[in-house]
Image (cartoon, rainbow, N blue to C red):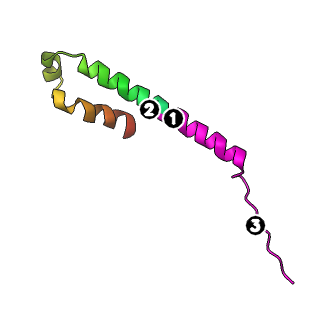
Amino acid sequence: MTTATLTNTGFNFGTRIMDMIERIKTARKRAAEYQRTYRELQSLTNRELDDIGIRRSDIADIAHKHVYCS
């Protein structure tokens, strides 16, 4: 009679919890970076934004690309 033993190496409960904690930390860092970028751009005057070629309506998209697409 042949028996098969299913082993799960490297993905035990503790490892999955630690991985989840790391993903949460990364997500929080990215969210903080997004907020910082958004606030900084939002604090510029319309003239300053015009000087660097940014419309106020594009600030959220620019902040998102800066954080999540780099």
**Can see residue 64?**
yes
Q: Is residue 20 left or right of residue 28?
A: right
Name the residue tied to disc 3: 6
Q: Is residue 54 visible?
A: no
Amino acid, disc 3: Leu
Residue sitting at x 30%, y 19%: 40
- Residue 41's spot in the image, x, y percent? 26, 22
Q: Quadrant of the N terminus?
A: bottom right
Q: Which residue is mark 1?
A: 26
**8 is higher (above) or lower (below) than 54:** below
Residues at marks 3 and 2 touching, judged by CB atoms closer than 8 Å = no
Q: Is 3 in the magenta?
A: yes
Q: Which residue is mark 2?
A: 30
Residue 32 is one of the magenta-drawn residues: no
Report whether 16 appears left or right of 9. Answer: left
Name the amino acid type tagged 1: Thr
Q: Judge whether 9 appears above or below 6 on screen.
A: above
Q: Which residues are magenta?
A: 1-27
First in sequence: mark 3 vs mark 2? 3
Give yes or no for contact between labels 1 and 2 (Cβ–Cβ under 8 Å). yes
Task: For marks 1 and 2, give the CA distance.
Answer: 6 Å
